[in-house]
Image (cartoon, coloured by chain):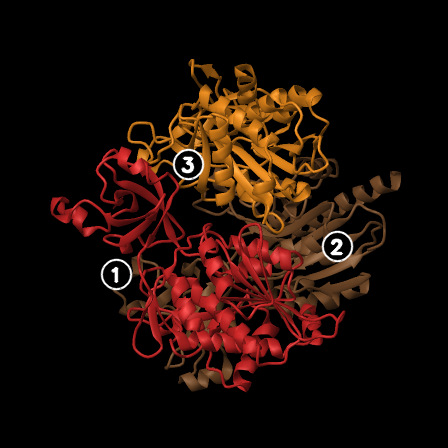
Amino acid sequence: MLLKQLTEACGAPGQEGEVRALIRSEVAPYVDEVRTDALGNLIAVKNPTSSGPKVMLAAHMDEVALMILGIEKNGYLRFRPIGGIDPRVLVAKAVLVGEKKIPGVIGSKPIHLQKPEERERPISIDDLLIDIGAKSQEEAEKLVKLGDCAYFATSYEEFGQDKVKAKALDDRVGCALLIELLKDSWEFPLYAAFTVQEEVGLRGAGVAAYQVQPDIALVFEGTTASDVPETEPHMRSTSVGKGPALTVMDRSVIPHPPLVRELIELAQRQGIPYQIRRSNTGGTDAGQIQLTAGGTKAAVISVPCRYIHSAASVMNKQDFTNALKLARAYLQSLQERKGEQ
Amino acid sequence: MEIKQLFQEIASSAGVSGYEDKISAQLQAACPWADEFRRDTLGNLIMLKRGKAEPGKKVPRVMLAAHMDEIGLIITKIEKDGFLRFSTIGGFDQRVLLGQEVTVHGRRELRGVIGAKPPHIQKPDEQKKAVKMEDLFIDIGFDSAEAVEELVGIGDLATINQKARALQGSFVAGKAFDDRAGVAAILECFKALDSLNFSAEVYGVATVQEEVGLRGAITSTYGIVPDIGIAIDVGFGDSPGLPEWQTIKLSGGPAIGLGPHVHPALHRRMVDTAKEWRIPYSIDPSPYPGGTDAYAIQVTQAGIPTILLSIPLRYMHTPIETLDYDDVKNTGRLMALFIAGLDNEFVEGLTCF
Amino acid sequence: MKDIIRTLTEAFGPSGYEGPVRDLIAGMIQSRVDEISTDVMGNLIAVKRGSSPEGKKIMFSAHADEIGIVVTHIDDNGFLRFTNVGGLSVETLIGNRVRFESGLIGVIYREKGELKDLALDKLYIDIGAESKEDAESKVRIGEFAIIHREFTDLGNRMTAKSMDDRIGCAILVQAIMELGDSPHTLFFVFSSQEEVGLRGARTSAYTINPDLGIALDVTLTGDVPEGPRMAVALGKGAAIKVKDSSMITHPKVKSFLAKLAAEGGIPHQFEVLERGGTDAGAIHLTRDGILAGTISIPCRYVHTASEMVDMRDVRACVDLVKAVATADLTALLEN
C-alpha cells in the first residue's frame, strides 16, 4: 500500500534518498522524464513539449527527524532536531538510527527518582539521549556516525473510523497525491516536483521552481488539525474528516485569490467537502514557488493531520480521497479550457 | 606581505556590513595570486584565478566565499549634551559593549567610550541585570549637540578598537576574525594553487553583508553561477563552559560541514582529500543549514552543490576572537588540493541523486 | 494633493487584495504614462519611456497594500474570530472598526480578562449579526478586512489609516502628474504584499531589472513623548534611509540622494530604523544585485488607525523623486 511504504520510509532534510528511490520507481512508468538536481529534488515530467499552461505540482519528501551530533564515551548519542520538533514529544519514544535503522530509545530519569517539581517541567533537550544499547563509544561508532538521523519507529496502521496512524504524514500524503495524479493522462505540460529540505526553510522548492518556471503551481501538504479537546472552536485550524483544507494565508504565502476561489467553486459544484485553513502560521513550498522569477499563481491543498511533527500523526482517509478528487477536478478543468482554445 | 600579516591588518581595519570598501582595497592591493579583480554592485570583491586548460574546453567553476564584513554600531541620535545613541549592525551581545573603546567614523575618526549610568546610582535590582542596549551611549568627549553635529551625522558608524595581537605559538586574538580568517584562508588557497596543477576557474569572493542576512552571497552567487560553492566561515571553538559535542577543537584543522547545507558527494570528497594529504580535520554535523553564506549559495537559481568549511574560533562576536592560524593555513591547503583534484566528470555527477 | 491622499488612504487594499487601490491609482495616472499593466502578483506597473537612448532604467516602488485582518471563524452567535494580515499590535485594535470589501463594518472588542494576557485570539468582531446564519450571509471564513478610519486634515499635518504606504503611492502619483520628460525610462511600481514580506517588489524587480531602485515608504519618528530613540522628526524633510532591517543603503546611493536634496534645496534628514523593512530590501538583492535606496516619509503611530505625516515632508519627497527621475546617473552607476 503506497502510503504505508511512503510513511515508513525514512528521509530527513538533506537525506531523502530512501524516499526518493521509492517515488522514482513508482512514477517512472507514467512519465516522459525523471531527473534530479543539485539539491536532490526529484522532478517528474509529463508532456514537456506540449503547449501550456505549464503546471507544477509540489510535495516535499523530507520529514522532521533528529540528527546525531555527538557520541558519548558511554555509548549514548547526543542529538538535536532537524526541522521543528517540540522537545516534549521526544521522551520515552523508540527510534531507528541511520541508514541501517539501528533501533534505539530516547530515555530519561525514571519517574520514581524524580522530585515532584521536576515532573512539572519539560525535560530539556540537552538532558535527552538516545540509547542504542552500546556499552562504549567504540561500539556505538561501529553502528552510527555523526550526521546520521534518527526517526520515530512508528509503523503505518489503519484504525478507528477511516483513520490512519503513521509518522511523516507531513508530507508523504502530498507525495502520494502527486503520484496518483501522475498516473492519470493529461495533455498539458505537468511537472511534479518532489522537493527536498522543506522542513529546514523551504529550501528545495524555489530551486525546483526556477528550473520549471510554471504558469500555475499547486502545493500539497499535510497540515495541522487541531480538532482535539482543550481547543476552542476558533482555534481549530483544520478538522479531520471535513475535507481537504485550502489556505487563504500562511506565513509564507497568500495564495492567488482567483485560483483559490476557483478551487472553492469547483468543490462546491462537484459536492467535494472542503474547509478553509484558519491559522495564518506555518509555511509551505508555495511561498518559495510563488516568488520565483517574475512570480507565479500558486495555491495550497492540504490534508488535515493531527499531531504532525511527532511520532504518530493521524488523518482521515476520506480527506485524502477528497483532496485527490479536488486536484483532479481542477486539472480536468484546465484540460477542458485548453481544449476550448 | 605574508598572508598571516595581511590577515591581521585587515582584521584590525574597519569594515562594517555595507561599508567594506577599505577591506576590499587592502585585499586587492596586497594579493598577487589572482588573475583578475572585480567588484560587483553590492561591493563583493571577486578574485578570479584561472587554472591551466585547453582554450574553449569546459572546466569546473568553483566559488570560494568568505565574508569580509564585521558587526558594528550605527549612530541613531545625538543627545542635547553631546552623547551619541546607537544601534547595532549584526548580532552583538550587548554585555560585551559596556566600557569598550570605540572609533566613531564621522567626518574624521573620533575616539569614544561606551558608557551607561554608573553602578553606584543604579537601584539594587538594576545592578543585577545586564545593561540594555538602549541605555548605552557613546561618549566622544564633546559637551553639546552643536559641537558634535559638525563632526558626526545620523547613520555614521562606530567600531570597537582592537588591534590583532599574537598569543602563544600560532594563536592570534583580535576583532573581525569572523570572517576575515575565512578570507585569509581563500588567499592561502590561492597561494597553494600556484604550486599545483589544476584546470578549474576559481572565484574567490570576499562577500559583503553576511552578518545582516547573507546578502553579498545571494547576489555574488547569482552573478557567478558556480558548479561548486565552498563557504568558509568560523565555527564555535572549544572553550570552558561549552560541551565538547557542540564545539570544534582548535589546532585540529578545518571542520568539514555535514548536513542539509552540504552536498553529500562534496563532503565525502573533501574528507577523502584531507585523509589522502594528511591534513588535520574534524567533522561538523549541523541540523541547521543557516547562519553562513552556504545557506544562500545553495539555493541560487537552479541550485548549487555547496559545502561549508569552518575555522574553529573562540569568543565569537567579541573584540577578542581567538584562533590558531595553522587552522587557517590548513583550510587553505585543503581547498587547494580539493580543487586540484576536480574534473568535469565529478562535477556532472553532482546533480545525480 | 490632499484629495489624492484622502482617496487612497480611505481605499480598501489589504495584502493580496489590492485591486481597489490599483483601480483608483490607474484612473489617476493613466493619461500621464505610456504603459500601464498589472502582473501576476498584483503589482500595478506604470511606465514612462525615457527621451534619451542613453537613458537608464529607474524603478520607483510604493506599496499599495495595507495591514488588515482575516476572518477565521464564525461562532454560534454570529461573532467573528480573526487573525492578522501583516504586523498588527493587539492593543491598537480594541474599540476600533474593520471594513470588508463589501463595505460591511464590524467592531473589535475583547474577551473579559487581564490586559497582560491580551492576544489576538482573545479578540472578536461584532458585525451586528443576530445569529450565525445572519453572519454567514454577510461574510465568509477566509475573507480579508482592513481597519476602518477616515482621513482628517489637521493643517500642516494629516492623519489617516494606511498612510503606510498610501502616502508613498500618493507621492508617486503626484510626481507622475508634475514630471515632464526624463532621459530615463521610469517604472512606477505600486507593489503588492509588502506588509507580508516585500513580495510584490521581489518579483517586479526581477522582471524590470532596473539600474536603480528607489522605494517610497514611511518611517517612524522620535519626536513623540517617550518615543523611540531616533533623530527623525515630522517637518524636517524627506528622510534618506541609511539602514533598516531589510537593507543597508549603499553609501553611493546615500550620497547621491543627499547631494540631489542639497543641490535642489530640498529639506531632508537621515534615518536609521531599528526594526522594519521596505521594498528596497527586496529590490537590492535581485539577480546579481541592484543599487537601491529608500526615500522615507516620517510618520507617527505607524500601524495604527491614525498614522500622521507632515505635508512639508510629503512635498519634499515629491521633489526628491522628481530630482532622481531626471538626474544624471553616470557617476552613480560607474563601477
Q: In the picture shown, does residue B81 fall above or below C125?
A: below
Is residue A191 placed above or below B169 in the rendered structure?
Answer: above
SS at circle 3:
strand
- Quadrant where the N terminus of chain C sits is top right
Asked if labels 3 and 2 share a chain, the reply is no
**Residue under numbered circle 2:** A191
Marks 1/3 same chain: no
Three-letter code, disc 2: Tyr
Name the mark nearer the viewer: 3 or 2: 3
Circles 1 and 2 on the same chain? yes
Question: How far is disc 1 from disc 2 in space, using C-alphas?
Answer: 56 Å
Q: Mark 1 — residue?
A: A116
Query: Residue A9 at what x, y percent from top left?
Result: 61, 68
Q: Residues within 10 Å of mark 2 (few under 14, many from 20)?
A: many
The three-letter amino acid code for the residue at tag 3 is Glu
Q: What residue appears at the point 36 percent right and 74 percent down from the top-left corner? A: B244
Q: Secondary structure at mark 1?
A: helix
Residue B214: percent from the left, percent from the top?
51, 55
- Looking at the rendered structure, the kind of residue marked 1 is Pro
Q: Which chain is brown?
A: A
Q: Colour of chain B?
A: red
Q: Outermost residue, left direction?
A: B120
User: Which colour is chain C painted?
Assistant: orange
- Res. A202 in view: no
Which residue is pictured at 82% across the width and 46% down the height? A52
Chain identifier of the residue bearing label 2 in the image: A
The residue that mark 3 highlights is C271
Question: Distance between the Cα atoms at labels 3 and 2?
Answer: 47 Å
**Pointer 3 and pointer 2: residues touching (CB < 8 Å)?**
no
